[in-house]
Amino acid sequence: MHMHRLEKIWLTFGFSMLVVFLLILGVMTFSMGMAPPSSHHHSIDPTMVNETAPFDKPVLKKVGDNEYEAIMTAFAYGYAPGTLEVPAGATVHFTITSPDVIHGFEIPGTNVNMMVLPGEVNHTTHTFKKPGEYLILCNEYCGIGHEMMKTTLVVK
Ligand code: CUA
């Protein structure tokens, strides 16, 4: 079949545009992968939370001068680690996710109030100036044990 010159030109043009488009798409995907829109947000497989670092070992650890990192999980119906204790004035960086359903992470009397979605890693930071017992509670209905889902952070 004979192809007209004009058709050839258009075909070449169309193909070039496709290549250019794919290149742009590739570059965009690549650069987005390198710098996600929110660098403080990522997700993991919710069914693998308890096997995925750092959530396989929930912990409260000292990371600086009166600065702590709390690696936590919110699950039906509780939080891990179960008890948290820091000195007065401590800044705590919370990193939390859920292996099952949506939970809440609220510390009444502070501005800490997070939604904890399955496999979504959420962060917040708070400085606990006043000593006392701070209640950490779930404010998202998550099932029969929802009302009991709470823990305590002790500031000494
Ligand atoms: Cu967990 Cu409500």
Image: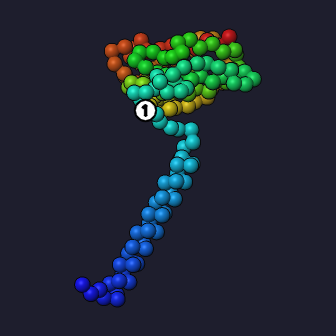
Q: Nearer the viewer, residue 9 or 131?
A: 9
Q: Residue at x 34, y 19 (%)?
A: 143
| Image x and y of residue 91, in percent | 67, 24
- Residue corresponding to mark 1: 45
Which residue is rendered at x = 36% and y = 81% of the image? 10
Q: Quadrant of residue 18?
A: bottom left
67 to the left or right of 45: right
x and y percentages locating residue 127 in the rendered image: 66, 24
Residue 120: where, in percent of width, then height?
46, 33
**Front in this rendered view, residue 2 or 24:** 2
Quadrant the N terminus occupies: bottom left
In the rendered image, is residue 143 in sight? yes
Q: Can residue 117 be seen from the camera position used here?
A: no
When the figure is inspected, residue 8 is found, relative to residue 122, above or below; the finding is: below
Quadrant hosting residue 98 = top left
Q: Amino acid at mark 1?
A: Asp
